[in-house]
């Protein structure tokens, strides 16, 4: 792709710098000229998505390291850029652009736009960081930006509810960060480093014992708050029901996946083959079961989506807990599938934010949106030709191959959850195509939301047709992520040369 | 008697602060106290982080002030703890501002009351009967038809009154006086 300058790997820093700069320029620029301020955000996000895609094409073959300030890895802070990092870093500006809120939810323009850009910058940093403390800092930045975005959604009747939801989310998230920081402290105490590659190198001798495992558990709970992990996901239904649906789409789709990616990096590099996998499997199974059961009981559309998102992330955790590259492949497939579908469904919920009963007969006034809902529901459940089926199949075969008692329980729970999922999704699908009750008129989703959902639906269908190249690409990414020795050799070439 | 080193004592204190904070978060029902518990927990973890680089009798890691040959404490945790403190203060300030908004809206900070308000408000905007309410019969009996949106606005005032009375005992006097001063 064409860039106005000769690209070097170091230009990837711009993908972080541009949205960050844009976030702080947003307020003054909106004061000077309102249209210019409105243009700034989408322009910056489009530019950084384009830049990341161009760099991915140019340098995506082999993983590389960007040493910030030119300090070499064991001492300096690094960005570790492999295909996985590229995949999620490119998704960040792309999804933020698709769910750009244009300040329609807040009285004074520029505020939510600035927070959205801050969120994009921090999330990009989260995908690229190769350093435990930088991950903590970027994680906190995304958290603060999302608190602001959720609270800004407070308008009209439910204004107070949005504040309560924000504060409860904030307290849980901040306490999670405290636990994560304890985990980071333990790891630093045991290994003497925060660089992920060096931790990976030292892990077999320093971290594979109960204290190291405790550190992983603390980090898992800490970062699991954003990833909607089982015991720390109480904020999910409240926040998604009170926040603007586009923000909920970003939180449920994008941010949860980035938190999961952080956990996966830790698991693969430092804790693979220890009790960590079992812990993740157990928590994922519990999350799946509780989430789907709660979704079955939900009677309003946003909270049904929120609970189902908890369940889906349970499957993501189950998939990533499978050992080796097959686990990462299954996890990536499920995570990307959920990223696309849940974002689109929350987009539809912008106007369909009421009870499920109010959606009776919506197919008449919104035929395309209803058809898209049915398509997404089929793929979520896992009806064969759609990508959701293949993603779930990868998880199920992985669990069956593992064969342990916990894995077989998880397999049963996945099947049971699929049945529950089918029950409540079909119940709503049937409702959409019923005759509307006389005198009521179901809401129609806005044209833009339907257009975004249609793009995702189209992507889903294209993925169904191009399954083989897609699977090959994901397999390549998974193999690269699982290659611990390769990661260490990339980040710390001198250390590896000295002690082969 | 076991001889306790200075480091062991301080680490124990840090873990104690963490536990106090965690218990405070779980046990208190006032949102402001929960926030204070979080502050205590953060202090504990910051102390723990500094101790990760502690060396007995070593100097502060400042170049040019100390003799370079002297042993120094590990500077990395100190850098980290500065960042963690700054982040913590920022989040706490944000939390207090949201806390004020909640108090302005509902006049209470009792989490039990607020949780009920939250459930009611979400249900009202969605146009459904709140879970576990008097309107929803237990035992799987059929639900009454959902409340139409036009009625919900008028029902807001009477539903709030009884909850407020319930909250009276745990209102936070210091915060409400602070707010009235503004």
Image: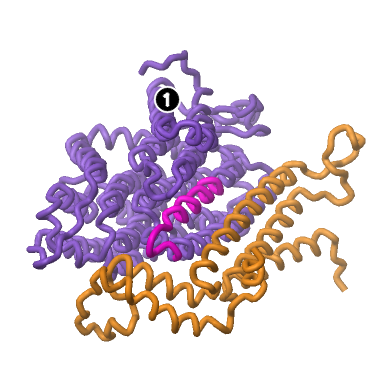
Chain colours: A purple, B orange
Residue at 25 percent of width and 74 percent of height:
B147
Res A218 visible: no
| Camera-side residue of B55 and A162 | A162
Which image quadrant is residue B99 in? bottom right
Image coordinates for residue B115, horizontal then vertical, percent: 45, 73
Question: Is label 1 in a helix, a strand or a loop?
Answer: helix
Image coordinates for residue A170, horizontal then vertical, percent: 53, 59
Q: Is residue A43 above or below residue B151?
A: above
Give the letter of the chain under mark 1. A
Res A425 visible: yes
Q: Quadrant of the N terminus of chain A?
A: top left
Image coordinates for residue A187, horizontal then vertical, percent: 63, 50
Which image quadrant is residue B69 in? top right
Residue at the far right: name it. Answer: B67
Q: Is residue B108 above or below residue A121?
A: below
Q: Is residue A56 left or right of residue A136?
A: left
| Camera-side residue of B11 and A171 | A171
Residue at 35 percent of width and 44 percent of height:
A332
Asked if the stretch drawn in magenta spans residue A92, the answer is no
Stretch in magenta? A139-160
Mark 1 surroundings within 10 Å by alpha-carbon count, few (fewer than 14), some (14 through 19), many (20 or more): many
Residue at mark 1:
A51
Q: Is residue A39 left or right of residue A338?
A: right
Dominant SS of magenta comes to: helix
Q: Is residue A497 above or below residue B138?
A: above
| Camera-side residue of A409 and B135 | B135
């Amino acid at each position: 792709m064409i860039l106005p300058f000769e690209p070097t790997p170091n230009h990837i820093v711009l993908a972080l710098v541009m949205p960050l700069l844009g976030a702080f320029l947003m307020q003054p620029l909106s004061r000077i000229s309102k249209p210019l301020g409105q243009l700034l955000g989408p322009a910056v996000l489009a530019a950084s998505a384009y830049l990341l895609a161009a760099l991915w094409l140019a340098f995506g073959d082999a993983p590389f390291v960007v040493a910030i300030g030119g300090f070499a890895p064991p001492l300096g802070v690094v960005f570790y850029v492999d295909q996985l990092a590229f995949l999620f870093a490119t998704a960040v500006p792309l999804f933020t652009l698709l769910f750009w809120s244009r300040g329609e939810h807040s009285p004074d323009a520029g505020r939510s736009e600035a927070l959205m850009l801050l969120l994009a910058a921090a999330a990009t940093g989260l995908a690229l960081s190769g350093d435990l403390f930088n991950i903590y800092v970027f994680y906190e930045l995304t958290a603060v930006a999302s608190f602001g975005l959720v609270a800004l959604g407070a308008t009209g009747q439910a204004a107070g509810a949005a504040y309560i939801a924000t504060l409860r989310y904030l307290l849980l998230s901040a306490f999670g960060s405290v636990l994560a920081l304890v985990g980071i402290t333990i790891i630093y105490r045991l290994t003497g480093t925060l660089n992920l590659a060096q931790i990976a190198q030292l892990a077999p001798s320093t971290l594979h014992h109960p204290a190291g495992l405790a550190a992983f558990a603390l980090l898992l709970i800490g970062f699991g708050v954003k990833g909607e992990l089982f015991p720390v996901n109480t904020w999910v239904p409240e926040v998604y029901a009170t926040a603007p649906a586009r923000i909920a789409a970003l939180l449920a789709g994008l941010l949860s996946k980035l938190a999961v990616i952080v956990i996966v990096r830790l698991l693969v590099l430092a804790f693979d083959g220890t009790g960590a996998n079992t812990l993740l499997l157990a928590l994922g199974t519990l999350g799946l079961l509780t989430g789907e059961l709660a979704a079955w009981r939900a009677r309003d559309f946003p909270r049904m989506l929120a609970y189902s998102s908890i369940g889906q992330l349970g499957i993501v955790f189950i998939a990533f807990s499978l050992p080796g590259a097959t686990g990462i492949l299954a996890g990536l497939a499920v995570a990307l599938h959920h990223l696309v579908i849940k974002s689109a469904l929350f987009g539809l919920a912008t106007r369909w934010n009421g009870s499920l009963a109010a959606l009776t007969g919506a197919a008449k006034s919104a035929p395309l949106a209803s058809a898209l809902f049915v398509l997404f529901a089929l793929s979520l459940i896992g009806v064969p030709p759609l990508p959701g089926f293949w993603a779930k199949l990868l998880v199920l075969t992985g669990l069956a191959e593992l064969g342990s008692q916990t894995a077989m329980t998880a397999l049963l729970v996945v099947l049971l959850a699929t049945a529950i999922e089918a029950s409540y999704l079909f119940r709503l699908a049937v409702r959409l195509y019923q005759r509307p009750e006389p005198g009521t008129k179901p809401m129609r989703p806005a044209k833009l939301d339907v257009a975004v959902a249609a793009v995702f639906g189209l992507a889903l269908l294209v993925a169904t047709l191009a399954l083989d190249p897609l699977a090959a690409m994901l397999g390549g990414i998974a193999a690269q992520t699982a290659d611990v020795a390769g990661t260490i050799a990339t980040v710390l070439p001198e250390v590896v040369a000295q002690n082969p | 008697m076991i001889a306790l080193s200075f480091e062991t004592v301080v680490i124990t204190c840090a873990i104690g602060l963490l536990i106090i904070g965690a218990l405070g978060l779980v046990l208190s029902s006032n949102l402001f106290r929960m926030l204070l518990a979080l502050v205590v927990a953060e202090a504990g973890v910051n102390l723990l982080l500094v101790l990760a680089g502690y060396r007995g009798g070593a100097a502060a890691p400042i170049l040019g002030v100390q003799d370079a040959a002297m042993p120094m404490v590990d500077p990395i945790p100190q850098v980290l703890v500065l960042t963690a403190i700054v982040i913590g203060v920022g989040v706490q300030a944000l939390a207090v501002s949201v806390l004020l908004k909640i108090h302005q809206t509902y006049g209470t900070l009792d989490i039990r009351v607020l949780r009920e308000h939250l459930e009611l408000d979400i249900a009202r905007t969605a146009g459904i009967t709140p879970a576990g309410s008097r309107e929803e019969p237990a035992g799987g009996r059929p639900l009454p038809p959902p409340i139409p949106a036009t009625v919900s606005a008028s029902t807001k005032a009477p539903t709030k009154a009884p909850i407020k009375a319930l909250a009276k005992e745990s209102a936070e006097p210091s915060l409400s006086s602070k707010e009235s001063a503004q």
